């Protein structure tokens, strides 16, 4: 009898151990799974930013921050890091020159740190944000623009970069920081606010100076401009100096956001809107399938715009990896035809909604779309 009891006691203990181990392992696995992805980290409720998960991710952000003050791009910073990951990131702080403004990098991390700091008041997140702000201020060129990467890299990375809204994202953040009424950045000191405002003013001057003139007439912007001459510049083999039907939209929207715009800003916006109206393409549809992109005739299609227009002719231009300009998407190899955004409908809302609202407020007697 005692042997049976002893045997059952042992079995019971083993079952409890297994059950407890399974429970702890389940908790461990659960702890290793992030609740959100980095791309959604700026879409959470105010109260979430003081949670343990928000703090864990903010600590990741600090680990990814290079000693330059900036961040690399295309990384899910919400992923769980183990100790080896953290050791690697500490090593990379001093040994990677990959701090960039491309694809929302640096700006997104700074916005996140600001939200977590405002919710937690943990000083390390404020320090990381200020270091990022100093990085932005240091990276600005004398003529007001920003490169894609800083410290500078050779090639197109050092051009003033409007591509993918890089410079607009920087200016929008600095504009918010400079505003003493903006609660999200209430912790930023007055001296930094002043520097942010000065950087925005220089950036606006740069935008106005970069706007491309054709036969004395203001039009739009290139995706990148030379830092010294401010002339339109090339980037990759298939990205030629041109008028951008996509990047120019973000620039105009930024200019429209400015309160009490100067006559120069009003003139710039009016000219760009008129150019968009002139450059719209009608009667075509861009059809996408699983393995190709083709342009087909469609008389009922809404207007669409090309990503790039030839300066001087306003003809849509396309190019493959050979760098040769073509005037038809069908002439570009399939890899580039399907692997790049050659058309956009972004200007449609700018013309139909944003411009009428802005024009009624700041240029009520001059609607360029009616001419």
Image (cartoon, rainbow, N blue to C red):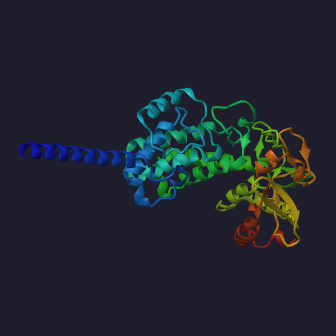
Where is residue 117 shown, x and y percent of the image? 42, 49
Where is residue 229 shown, x and y percent of the image? 80, 38
Q: Quadrant of residue 146?
A: top right
Residue 193 visible at all: no
Residue 288 visible at all: yes
How many marks are shown on the rendered structure?
A: 0
Q: Residue at x 87, y 68 (%)?
A: 298
As rendered, which of 245 and 227 lies closer to the eye?
245
| In the displayed structure image, the side of residue 353 where residue 29 appears, left or right | left
Q: Quadrant of residue 154?
A: top right
As rendered, which of 106 and 51 lies closer to the eye?
51
Q: Residue at x 28, y 44 (%)?
A: 21
As rendered, which of 275 and 52 lies closer to the eye?
52
Q: Residue at x 42, y 54 (%)?
A: 49
In the displayed structure, 313 sits above or below 283; it is above
Q: Quadrant of residue 235?
A: top right
Where is residue 333 shown, x and y percent of the image? 85, 45
| In the displayed structure image, the side of residue 47 where residue 263 appears, left or right | right
In the displayed structure, 89 sits above or below 172; it is above
Where is residue 230 shown, x and y percent of the image? 79, 41
Q: Residue furthest front?
A: 1
Point out the image quarter for the C terminus.
bottom right
Q: Residue at x 53, y 46 (%)?
A: 109
């Amino acid at each position: 009898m005692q042997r049976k009891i002893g045997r059952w006691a042992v079995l019971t203990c083993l079952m409890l151990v297994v059950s407890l181990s399974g429970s702890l392992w389940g908790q461990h696995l659960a702890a290793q799974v992030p609740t959100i992805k980095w791309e959604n980290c700026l879409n959470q409720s105010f109260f979430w930013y003081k949670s343990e998960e928000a703090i864990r991710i903010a600590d990741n952000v600090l680990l990814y921050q290079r000693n330059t003050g900036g961040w690399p791009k295309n990384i899910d910073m919400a992923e769980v890091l183990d100790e080896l990951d953290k050791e690697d990131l500490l090593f990379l702080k001093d040994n990677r020159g990959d701090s960039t403004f491309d694809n929302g990098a640096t700006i997104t991390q700074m916005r996140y740190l600001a939200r977590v700091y405002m919710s937690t008041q943990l000083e390390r997140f404020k320090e990381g944000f200020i270091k990022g702000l100093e990085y932005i201020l240091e990276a600005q060129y004398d003529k007001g623009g920003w490169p894609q990467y800083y410290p500078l890299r050779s090639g197109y990375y050092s051009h003033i970069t409007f591509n993918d809204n890089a410079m607009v994202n920087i200016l929008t953040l600095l504009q918010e920081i400079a505003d003493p009424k903006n609660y999200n950045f209430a912790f930023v000191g007055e001296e930094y606010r002043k520097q942010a405002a000065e950087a925005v003013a220089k950036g606006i001057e740069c935008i106005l100076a970069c706007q491309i003139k054709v036969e004395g007439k203001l039009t739009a912007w290139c995706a990148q401009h030379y830092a010294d001459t401010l002339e339109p510049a090339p980037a990759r083999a298939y990205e030629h100096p041109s008028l951008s039907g996509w990047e120019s939209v973000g620039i105009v929207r930024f200019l429209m956001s400015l309160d009490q715009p100067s006559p120069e800003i009003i003139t710039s916006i009016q000219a760009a809107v008129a150019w968009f109206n002139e450059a719209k393409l009608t009667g075509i549809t861009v059809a996408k399938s699983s393995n190709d992109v083709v342009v087909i005739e469609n008389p009922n299609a809404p207007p669409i715009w090309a990503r790039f227009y030839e300066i001087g002719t306003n003809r849509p231009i396309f190019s493959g990896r050979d760098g040769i300009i073509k005037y038809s998407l069908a002439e570009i190899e399939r890899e580039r035809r399907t692997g790049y955004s050659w058309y956009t409908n972004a200007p449609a809302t700018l013309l139909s909604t944003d411009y009428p609202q802005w024009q009624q407020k700041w240029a009520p007697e001059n609607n360029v779309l009616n001419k």
